[in-house]
Image (cartoon, rainbow, N blue to C red):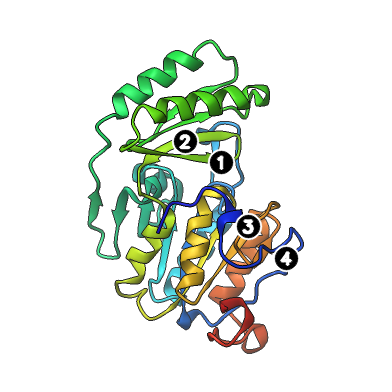
Amino acid sequence: MQSVTDPSSASGAMPSDGAQVPPVPQPGRVALFLDLDGTLAEIRPDPGLVAIPHATLDILARLDQALDGALAILSGRPGVDLDRLLQPLALPYAAGHGAEWRGRDGRVTQAPPPPGLPAVQAALQAQVEHWPGVWIEAKGHGVAVHFRGAPEYGGRVEAAVREVAGRHPLDFDVQPGKMVFELRPRGVDKGQALRRFMQRAPYAGRTPVAVGDDLTDEAAFIAARQAGGFGIKIGAGPSAAPWRLDDPRALARWLERLGAPAPESGPAISKEQPWAD
């Protein structure tokens, strides 16, 4: 599937910001894919300050058992960051948007970094070093330029990232996000990562549910929909996801219900139900 950076390119009607709160399906039927920043944890000005609440980690541990292991993290962060933030859990993940992948067996595989990565990082560093509040995050397989501390530089950051990417058209895709523009390996996205998980046990044969808050998650929402599942958008903004929760705290409450559902908490997911159209 072509990489998705704009939810308006998704097929079907786009839900409004007032989309309904998602149902709680039967955990034995679901494969769950979770973003981290802005989803399991609140976004911070510095990604190094992000932390997942201990209560959420406890919920994830119980949920991993309730789903029989059909749980994975889809994130733009490197895998070492995911393990640090999720400890003591060691969950399957697609890190770097899928450039780094760990399955249920614990084995890690990585795509080689794009050959142009050192040149791209150096070029962007030279352009932004005199822009106060703008900083670069090296990601192993890509590079992100953050301007949360200087929103007025957003236009300049986008122009710089797209100009540098244009010098390496076979290596990188430009990924917009919340106060960030990122270069990620060309053809790598969370939708492809979700599909890879869904080809393997214990995910295969289940209904995929993807949860995220940013443009990077739209490809996963669309991949889940195409496989008969659905997406859940965290926070405001247009999205291909048909369901919505306000913030990571609301998601934690939903995950807790999913991990220990009462009989009346929700029906099993079936392709006849409207959220799986």
Q: Is there a contact, CB below 8 Å, between mark 3 and mark 4? A: yes
Q: Badge 3, how many Cα within 10 Å: few under 14, some, many 20+?
A: many
Tag 2 and tag 1, C-beta contact below 8 Å: yes
**Residue 264 in which image quadrant:** bottom right
Quick one: label 2 or label 4, which is nearer the N terminus? Answer: 4
List the residue tagged with mark 1.
177
Instruction: Reply above or below: 66 against 2.
Output: below
Please, what secondary structure does the residue beneath circle 3 have? Answer: loop
Where is residue 60 shown, x and y percent of the image? Answer: 49, 63
Q: Position of residue 19 (x, y in %)?
A: 72, 65
Q: Residue at x 46, y 65 (%)?
A: 223
Secondary structure of the residue carrying numbered label 4: loop
Q: What residue did someone put label 3 on?
A: 239
* Numbered badge on residue 19: 4
Q: Work out whether residue 29 or residue 111 is closer to the camera in this orientation and state it.
A: 111
Which residue was labeled with disc 2? 182
Q: State the image coordinates of residue 154 (x, y, percent, origin top left).
A: 62, 27
